[in-house]
Image (cartoon, helix red, strand yellow):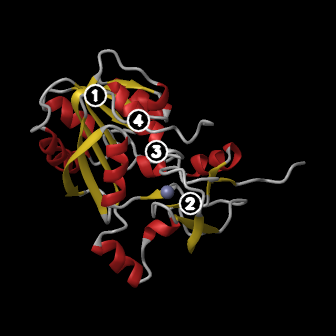
């Protein structure tokens, strides 16, 4: 019987490749809804001494991910709270309209699908990727194209006009291949919509001061971005950030609109692959 192994440590910073990663925050995650034995009751966060990126000390092994995924299976259901969510989704879509008004809208990790359902209403051709088959089936039943797919392995033909990844990038082990895949699957000049917590926001700092910041014990996140760090990352992957906004979906979150460059994008080395 082999010992249970929870995390595979990051050997270098997944954003800049730097190897000086130092401990910064330790948090108790035993009250998290997805917590289950034999997962560790504490989470360790690290900071890259080279670029300042804040990340977990590792990503889950398949065995640990299986436990976490099982516990969080309930998740969001397609169409849940849609009448209220439709207002929030419409505001997000209106921020995209100055860049793109038609074409394929790919939403990665569509969750309750409120963004895609509303994008259809605005005249986009919606396509959803999600890892949960139940959600894929539920969205198809509403007449919307849905696939159980991972964007890093997908090739859209024709390419998308808009790609949205709301509260997705901080859940990925390696964000660069995900942004590279978004670049590959977007038309030149296409729009990318991202949302995620912002650790540089005054609200985040106030939550820290009061000892109630939920993100240090968020077991499903591997990264904490700032406005500056996500902008740098986008630029290095061939996107130009065009708009900063705050997200109405989750606490202390930001919403970034970026445009895909017309060139191939100065795509950096994939840190997941050997040099
Ligand atoms: Zn770094």
- Mark 3 within 8 Å of ligand 1, using the beta carbon: no
Measured along the vertical axis of the image, is residue 154 above or below residue 110? above
Percent across and percent down for residue 148 are 47, 28
**In front of the other: 242 or 166:** 242
Outermost residue, left direction? 98
Give whichever of discs 2 and 3 has the lower sequence position.
2
Between disc 2 and disc 4, the foreground one is 4
Q: Secondary structure at mark 3?
A: helix
Q: Report the residue marked by disc 1.
A: 263
Residue position for label 2: 56
Q: Quadrant of residue 109?
A: top left
Residue 267 marker: 4
- Tag 4 secondary structure: loop
Give SS at disc 2. Answer: strand
- Using the image, determine if residue 195 lies above or below residue 115: below
Image point (14%, 26%), residue name = 102
Q: Are marks 4 and 3 in contact (CB under 8 Å)?
A: no
Q: Residue at x 49, y 26 (%)?
A: 153
Residue 46 lies, in percent from the top left, at 56, 66
Mark 3 Cα-neighbour bin, 10 Å: few <14, some 14–19, many ≥20: some
Residue 150 in sight in this render: no
Q: Residue at x 37, y 43 (%)?
A: 236
Residue denoted by label 3: 175
Which quadrant of the rendered structure holds the C terminus? top right
Label 1, label 3: how far apart the Cα atoms are: 21 Å
Counting residues from the N terminus, which is met first, the one under dot 2 or under dot 4? 2
């Amino acid at each position: 019987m082999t010992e249970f192994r929870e995390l595979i440590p990051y050997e270098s910073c997944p954003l800049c490749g730097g190897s000086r990663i130092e401990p910064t925050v330790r948090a108790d995650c035993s009250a998290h809804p997805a917590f289950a034995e034999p997962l560790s009751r504490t989470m360790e966060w690290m900071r890259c001494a080279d670029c300042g990126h804040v990340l977990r000390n590792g990503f889950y092994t398949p065995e640990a991910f299986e436990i976490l995924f099982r516990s969080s299976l309930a998740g969001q259901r397609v169409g849940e709270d849609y009448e209220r969510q439709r207002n929030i989704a419409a505001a997000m879509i209106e921020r995209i309209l100055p860049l793109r008004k038609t074409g394929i809208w790919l939403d990665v990790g569509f969750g309750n699908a409120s963004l895609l359902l509303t994008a259809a209403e605005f005249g986009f051709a919606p396509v959803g990727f999600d890892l949960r088959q139940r959600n894929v089936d539920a969205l198809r039943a509403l007449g919307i194209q849905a696939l159980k797919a991972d964007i890093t392995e997908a090739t859209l033909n024709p390419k998308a006009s808009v790609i949205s990844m709301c509260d997705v990038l901080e859940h990925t082990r390696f964000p660069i291949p995900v942004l590279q895949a978004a670049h590959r699957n977007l038309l030149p000049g296409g729009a990318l919509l991202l949302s995620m917590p912002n650790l540089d926001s005054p609200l985040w700092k106030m939550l820290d001061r009061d000892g109630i910041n939920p993100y240090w014990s968020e077991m499903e996140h591997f990264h904490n971005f700032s406005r500056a760090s996500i902008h740098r990352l986008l630029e290095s992957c061939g996107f130009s950030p065009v708009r900063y906004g705050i997200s109405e979906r989750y606490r202390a979150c930001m919403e970034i609109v970026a445009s895909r460059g017309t060139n191939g994008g100065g795509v950096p080395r994939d840190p997941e692959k050997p040099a």
